[in-house]
């Protein structure tokens, strides 16, 4: 498949494209194995929900570095899997993984799933592991994804529940805020928790033409490093922007607070934090 060097991006998603096809995506690509390990305890739940059959054609939205795409491609040995993502760097890792692992029925394309011209009704299943919460217009995005599914095709997503159920998010945010008031995006705005509200999920997917929307809660520990020092390097590489605007004393307080929470969460299995997700199933109407 020929990959366009200038994928079409909805103007409303331009900021997301700059981040994911820029420094943020590059950091995820550099640390692909760590990010995958962080959420690996959800893998069995998610793949069971996806229930990919040997001949399925699978679309992976926000595929990142391809772990899920390759997993579903192996299950669809007589079918195929297509991963789409905004990040060229992450897609390069995905292609390298596919080649190294000998998975020949997986392809990857750079694009904005909100507007990408998918072949109509050409997939049996669409999946997304924490990759579908960032659309500026989620109804338009899921309508476009639905158009790529055959009638009766399935959508299966893994999305975060509210921040209150995600200890990792609260702990890191509070530490790096260094006493400053925490403010997140308004409800429903693009971001990790834009699909945390079950009522909103049903509203968005219903408006996009999906039926039989069901949400299944899951809770697992997330892994952030082998020990506190390892996790601190990784976390600051990801969230160091939160230190912007702090003076030297504020930065010391933030890093000390981060180190303290990471140390408190050390275990024999590494640094672990509680997390909570929804696995969302829906049918294209």
Image (spheres, rainbow, N blue to C red):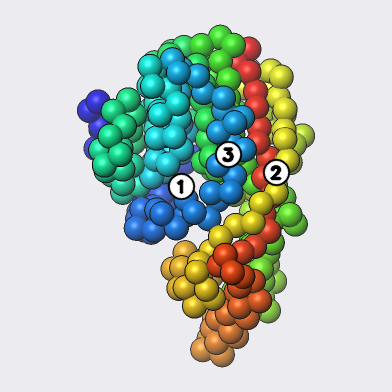
Question: 229 or 284: nearer the eye?
Answer: 229
Q: Categorize mark 2 by other alpha carbons within 10 Å: few (<14), some (14-19), many (20+).
A: some
- Taking the image as shown, residue 174 lies to the left or right of residue 56, namely right
Q: In the figure, 164 relative to 210: above or below? A: below
Mark 1 or mark 3, which has the lower sequence index? 1
User: In x, y percent, where is residue 251?
Assistant: 54, 83
Q: Quadrant of the N terminus?
A: top left
Residue appearing at x 69%, y 18% in the figure: 211
Q: Which mark is residue 78?
A: none
Q: Earlier in the sequence, mark 1 or mark 2?
A: 1
Q: Is residue 235 visible?
A: no
Q: Is residue 279 left or right of residue 197?
A: left
Q: Please give the residue where the numbered disc 2 appears in the rendered image.
A: 218
Q: Which mark is residue 16?
A: 1
Nearer to us: label 1 or label 3? 3
Q: Closer to us: mark 3 or mark 2? A: 3
Label 1 sits on a secondary structure element that is helix
* Residue at position x 46%, y 68% in the image: 234
Q: Quadrant of residue 270?
A: bottom right
Label 3 and label 2: CA atoms lie apart by: 11 Å
Query: Which of labels 1 and 2 is toward the front?
Result: 2
Rendered image quadrant of residue 43: top right
The reply to whether callout 1 and callout 2 are in contact (CB within 8 Å) is: no
């Amino acid at each position: 498949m020929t990959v366009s060097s200038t994928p079409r991006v909805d103007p409303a998603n331009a900021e997301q494209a700059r981040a994911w096809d820029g420094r943020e995506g590059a950091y995820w690509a550099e640390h692909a194995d760590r990010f995958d390990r962080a959420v690996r305890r959800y893998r069995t739940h998610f793949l069971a929900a996806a229930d990919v059959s040997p001949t399925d054609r699978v679309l992976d939205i926000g595929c990142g570095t391809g772990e899920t795409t390759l997993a579903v491609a192996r299950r669809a040995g007589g079918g195929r899997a297509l991963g789409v993502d905004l990040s060229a760097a992450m897609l390069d890792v995905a292609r390298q993984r596919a080649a190294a692992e000998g998975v020949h029925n997986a392809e990857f394309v750079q694009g904005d799933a909100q507007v990408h011209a998918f072949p109509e009704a050409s997939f049996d299943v669409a999946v997304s592991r924490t990759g579908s919460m960032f659309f500026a217009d989620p109804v338009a995005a899921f309508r476009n994804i639905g158009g790529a599914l055959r009638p009766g095709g399935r959508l299966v997503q893994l999305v975060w529940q509210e921040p209150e159920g995600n200890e990792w998010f609260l702990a890191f945010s509070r530490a790096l805020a260094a006493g400053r008031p925490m403010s997140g995006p308004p409800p429903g705005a693009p971001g990790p928790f834009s699909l945390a509200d079950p009522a909103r999920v049903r509203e968005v997917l219903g408006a996009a033409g999906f039926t039989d929307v069901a949400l299944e809660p899951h809770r697992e520990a997330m892994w952030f490093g082998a020990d506190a020092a390892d996790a601190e390097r990784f976390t600051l590489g990801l969230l160091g922007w939160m230190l912007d605007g702090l003076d030297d004393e504020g930065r010391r307080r933030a890093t000390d607070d981060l180190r303290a929470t990471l140390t408190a969460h050390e275990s024999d299995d590494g640094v672990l934090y509680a997390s909570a997700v929804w696995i969302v199933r829906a049918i294209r109407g």
